[in-house]
Structures are given as C-alpha cells and as structure tokens.
C-alpha cells in the first residue's frame, strides 16, 4: 500500500511544489509544505479517502500553505527591509508547471510581489482559478466557501493583479538583450545613461534579510535608482563571477564570490523600459542556487 501511495505522491510532486511556491514565494517553505502533505497522505484516514491523488494532495497543500502564509505574513511585518521571493531556476524543464507562457508569467517577481498584497484566501483562490484552472466549486471545497464567495475572492484578486502587472512584457530574447545593455551601462558608471533605461517611476528593491548590507527602503524614481545601482557597482569590494541564468522565467544576473552565490539581480520590463530592479542578497534565499 505504501508503495502505491508513494508512487501517486511522486507523480504529483512537481505540481504540488508549483502550487506551494506560488502560494508562499519560498522554495524552502514550499518543499516543507509538500513533505507535510506526504505525511498526511500516509495516515489511515487519508488512505481511505484518496480517490483522486492530485485533487486530494492539492487540497492538503493549499490548506497547509494557507497556515504557513498566515504565519509568514506576521514574520514579514518584522522583516528587515523589503521582502522578495526566493528566486527559482526555470531553465531545466517543467519543475514549476508545464512551462507555457502563463506558467512562467505566474512565476515572475512582478507577479509574486503583487500577490503579497492579497489576503491568504484571495491568493489561494486566484492562483487555483487563474493559474491552475480550478472551477469555483472545486476551489470552494478546498477553502470551505460557497461559489459566490469564491467568485468574489477571485474578482478582487484579479482586479488588484491586473492593475499592477506589466501589460506588455518583452519576449525572452528582448529581455536578455535589455539585461545585457543594462548591465553594461551600470558598469560604465554613467548615471544619466542608466536613468534613461529606467521608467520614470522605476523602483529598486533590495532584500538582504537583515544579514548582508542592503537598502532598507524601496528606492523610487529613475535618477535615484540609477545613482544607487551605479554606487553599488563602484563600491563592490570584490570582483564577482558573473553569469546569466533563467530564474522565474526570465534571464537574470547571478554573481558569485568565493564559490558561493552572493546575489541575484532581476529586471521587470515594460515598453522597453525597466520598471523594477530586484536584488536578492539574503544568503538563505540564494544558497540553493549553488552547485550541489
């Protein structure tokens, strides 16, 4: 019996991690939630009710993720500086979905940061409906709400996400080209040229987790952002090993120091202008990018 359960669970593991990561913005927490779902699956009660493993396991994962998200929201209120999601590799296949355009857009930093403003129930309902194609009655059984309540949750979440999401994101090739130009300009130290690549209302968010040096507030405005980024390059006290990798569906800059990942830079782009620069510097959020 355990072998059958394990086979069913492993067949759904990638899907479950995909759901949990979008709920939590943390690959470590997502994997913990999925492992907890396996523990529940092995109970006698679960053995008796499992008829559709994906539906059952997704329900368990979403409910566990809701509990974790509620705790996380309390922790993030005390977080030092801006909180950013953990970047995840998407260059190696279908680890976070079928890797279609919608799957990748729902992994973007812009999308995940917008989700942070939703209530836990709004986030769950929206993700299940808009990303994973669940119906209102199916979501209602997971969240223990009626159809009308689910539609209202999805509608509120959709309105918020639609208002903030980039309307015309570039192709992956165009993103790569702009990233290359952005890095070259940043390294040149030309503040004016860098500011010209940024939208007027651009932001820079830096997440050091209170462990490494990072801006404690969101920096806003093209000129302020350009000055900050050029200053970071000028004051970097080591020569980093730079690589471009696909994280969260787009090319990103990864730099390493002394054999360890030291930071990730990702851009949000709309209409050929950079609207957001996100710097993930917290060691806990990037150590999983180190080679095994």
Image: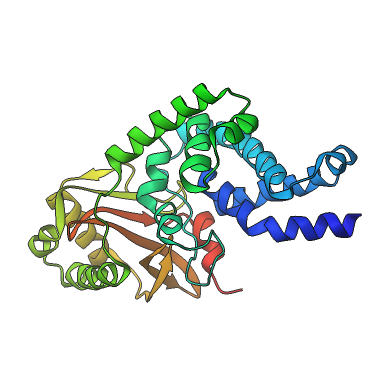
Quarter of the picture containing the C terminus is bottom right
Q: Nearer the viewer, residue 221 or 187?
A: 221
In this view of the protein, can residue 266 be seen by the observer? yes
For the point 42% across and 48% down, the residue is 84
For the point 27% across and 67% down, the residue is 175
For the point 49% across and 65% down, the residue is 89
Give residue 242's position: percent from left, percent from top: 37, 75
For the point 66% across and 38% down, the residue is 64
Q: Is residue 142 left or right of residue 245?
A: right
Count the labels in the image: 0
Give residue 279's position: percent from left, percent from top: 35, 56
Give residue 190's position: percent from left, percent from top: 11, 66
Give residue 80's position: percent from left, percent from top: 43, 40
Q: Quadrant of residue 154?
A: top left
Name above or below for residue 290 compared with residue 273.
below
Name above or below for residue 102 compared with residue 217.
below
Q: In the displayed image of the protein, which residue is found farthest to the left?
A: 192
């Amino acid at each position: 019996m355990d072998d059958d359960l394990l086979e069913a669970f492993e067949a759904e593991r990638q899907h479950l991690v995909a759901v949990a990561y979008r709920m939590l913005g943390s690959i470590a927490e997502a994997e913990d939630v999925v492992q907890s779902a396996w523990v529940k699956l092995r109970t006698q009660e679960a053995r008796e009710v499992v008829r559709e493993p994906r539906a059952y396991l997704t329900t368990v994962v979403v409910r566990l993720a809701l509990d974790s998200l509620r705790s996380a929201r309390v922790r993030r209120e005390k977080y030092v500086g801006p909180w950013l999601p953990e970047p995840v590799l998407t260059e190696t296949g279908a680890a976070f979905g079928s890797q279609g355009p919608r799957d990748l857009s729902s992994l973007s930093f812009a999308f995940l940061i917008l989700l942070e403003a939703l209530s836990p129930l709004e986030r769950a309902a929206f993700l299940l409906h808009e990303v994973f194609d669940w119906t209102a009655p199916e979501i209602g059984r997971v969240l223990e709400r009626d159809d009308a309540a689910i539609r209202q949750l999805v509608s509120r979440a959709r309105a918020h996400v639609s208002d903030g999401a980039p309307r015309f994101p570039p192709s992956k090739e165009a993103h790569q080209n702009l990233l290359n130009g952005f890095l070259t300009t940043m390294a040149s130290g030309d503040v004016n040229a860098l500011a010209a690549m940024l939208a007027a209302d651009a932001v820079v968010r830096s997440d050091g987790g209170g462990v490494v040096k990072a801006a404690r507030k969101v920096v806003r405005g093209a000129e302020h952002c350009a000055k900050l980024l050029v200053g970071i390059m000028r004051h970097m006290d080591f020569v980093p090993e730079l690589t471009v990798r696909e994280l969260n569906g787009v090319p990103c800059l990864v730099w390493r120091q002394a054999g360890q990942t030291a930071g990730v830079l990702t851009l949000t782009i709309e209409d050929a202008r950079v609207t957001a620069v996100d710097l993930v510097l917290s060691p806990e959020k990037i150590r999983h990018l180190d080679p095994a």
